[in-house]
Image: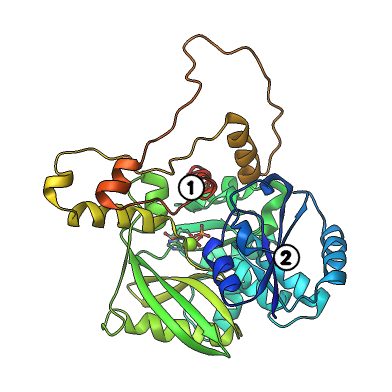
């Protein structure tokens, strides 16, 4: 029997965990203390272990070392983007199959992605690290704005800024404070944004799908609107250059086994690599699409003219909400408990039974995941 250690600092991967279990694997979970009571698919897991949010690498190794004494761990699976590095560290520590930290950094550090893609001959926006003042000034003399100043990935909540003019560069850089080396600066490439989702097995791409975002994600983040994406036909002319570039990228980045979600901009100069990750694409969009498709195709006599709640359908306490926000923002807030105020609504809960009965829709995106995306949206503004 194969034993898989899943690392997850967010409530994620239910389908993956269930599938591993169905295929006969033993699934162990390592998650954060705050998520111990989250809705994990417990019937599909052998054990759940927790670590504090502030755990260091040494702490994590100690916990996993003690788990590994009792279980022969064959694989380590990172369920969230933020767990990719921890997963890689643990594979090196336990010496189990799968990629280590060098490969993980290619999928997590936006500066490293740029450097490695450039080396592989894949078109990237003109970019620079922002470590040395003279180097940045020299780059800004050569590359015309607008530019994008963005976190390299370790602190993505800090957000992406568009730097429209040379005069805005210094204040933008200064606002990053001591975190400056953790950012990169690059040319803003105008164009539609596409994503390619892939599965790689034994170095071969066994699945690839190209999709196009309705509007570039940065516009949705700054101006609002509905976040949509549409999958293209794999045999269309529009998809062909993305399929080819993505295959080159994943080969150059040495992803032997795993999944990847990569983004590209289609600008005046053709396909430009935007970013990649060693995880599946966000699942949020699927709920919106599912509810709309079901509303459009359900019998009119059943649903025409009616309003439906599309929501998670489960109540959450304010303290749950606070814990999740703390986690998403990486901060600690001490709550003040006072007497209830007159008019306070003590309990609210969206009743989704009508959507479930008439449309057959049940939200698949968890409350945690939706909240996390909301935080990311505000952080990006
Ligand atoms: N160099 C760039 N040129 C144009 N748009 C960009 C550039 N970098 C980022 N963006 C915009 O910002 C969005 C988020 O940037 P991205 O690098 O994908 O970071 P993340 O998705 O991790 O927040 C992109 O989808 C795109 O709309
Ligand atoms: Mg992106």
Q: Residues within 10 Å of mark 1 (few under 14, many from 20)?
A: some
Q: Is residue 374 visible?
A: yes
The answer to whether mark 2 and mark 1 are in CB contact below 8 A is: no
User: SS for tag 1?
Assistant: helix
Residue 370: image tag: 1
User: SS for tag 2?
Assistant: helix
- For label 2, the residue is 86
Which quarter shows the N terminus?
Answer: bottom right
Q: Is the residue 375 above or below the residue 62 in the image?
A: above
Pick the front one: 169 or 260: 260
Q: Is the residue 319 above or below the residue 314 in the image?
A: above
**Residue 343 left/right relative to 41:** left
Pick the front one: 167 or 29: 29
- Mark 1 Cβ inside 8 Å of ligand 1: no
Q: Picture quarter containing residue 192?
A: bottom left
Residue at x 57% of width, y 86% of height: 252
**Residue 5 left/right relative to 268:** right
Residue 264 at what x, y percent from top left? 42, 71
Q: Residues within 10 Å of mark 2 (few under 14, many from 20)?
A: many
**Residue 366 left/right relative to 212:** right
Q: Farthest residue toward the top?
A: 342
Residue at x 53% of width, y 43% of height: 375
| C-alpha span from label 2 to label 1 | 23 Å
Residue 5: image tag: none
Residue at x 28% of width, y 78% of height: 233
Residue 230 at what x, y percent from top left? 30, 66
Q: Is residue 145 visible?
A: no
Residue 326 at what x, y percent from top left? 65, 39
Residue 139 at what x, y percent from top left? 57, 66
Pick the front one: 6 or 277: 6
Of the two numbered discs 2 and 1 on the same chain, state the one appearing first in sequence: 2
């Amino acid at each position: 029997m194969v034993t898989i250690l899943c690392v997850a600092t967010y409530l994620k991967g239910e389908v993956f965990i269930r599938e591993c279990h169905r295929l006969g694997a033993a699934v162990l979970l390592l998650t954060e203390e705050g998520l111990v009571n989250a809705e994990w698919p417990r019937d599909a897991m052998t054990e759940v272990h927790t670590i504090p949010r502030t755990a260091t690498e040494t702490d994590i190794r100690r916990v996993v070392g003690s788990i590994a004494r009792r279980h022969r761990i064959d694989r380590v699976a990172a369920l969230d983007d933020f767990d990719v590095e921890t997963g890689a560290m643990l594979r090196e520590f336990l010496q189990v199959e799968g990629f280590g930290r060098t490969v993980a950094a290619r999928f997590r550090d936006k500066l490293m992605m740029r450097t490695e893609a450039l080396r592989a001959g894949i078109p990237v926006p003109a970019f620079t690290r922002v470590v040395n003042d003279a180097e940045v000034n020299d780059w800004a003399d050569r590359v015309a704005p607008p530019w994008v100043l963005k976190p390299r990935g370790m602190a993505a909540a800090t957000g992406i800024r568009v730097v429209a003019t040379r005069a805005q560069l210094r204040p933008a850089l200064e606002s990053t404070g001591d975190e400056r080396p953790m950012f990169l600066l690059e040319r803003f490439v105008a164009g539609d944004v596409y994503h390619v989702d892939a599965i790689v097995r034994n170095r071969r791409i066994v699945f690839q799908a190209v999709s196009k975002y309705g509007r570039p994600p940065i516009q949705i983040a700054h101006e609002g609107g509905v976040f949509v994406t549409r999958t293209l036909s794999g045999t269309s002319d529009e998809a062909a250059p993305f399929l080819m570039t993505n295959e080159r990228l994943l080969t150059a980045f040495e992803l032997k086994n795993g999944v990847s979600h990569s983004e590209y901009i289609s600008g005046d100069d053709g396909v430009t690599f935007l970013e990649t990750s060693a995880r599946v694409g966000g699942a949020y969009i699927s709920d919106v699409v599912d509810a709309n498709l079901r509303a459009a195709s359900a019998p009119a006599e059943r649903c025409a003219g009616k309003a439906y709640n599309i929501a998670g359908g489960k109540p959450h306490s304010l303290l749950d909400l606070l814990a999740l926000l703390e986690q998403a923002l990486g901060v600690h807030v001490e709550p003040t408990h006072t007497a209830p105020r007159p008019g306070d609504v003590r309990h609210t809960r969206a009743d989704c039974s009508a959507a479930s009965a008439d449309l057959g829709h049940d939200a698949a995106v968890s409350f945690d995941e939706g909240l996390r995306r909301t935080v990311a949206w505000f952080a990006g503004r």
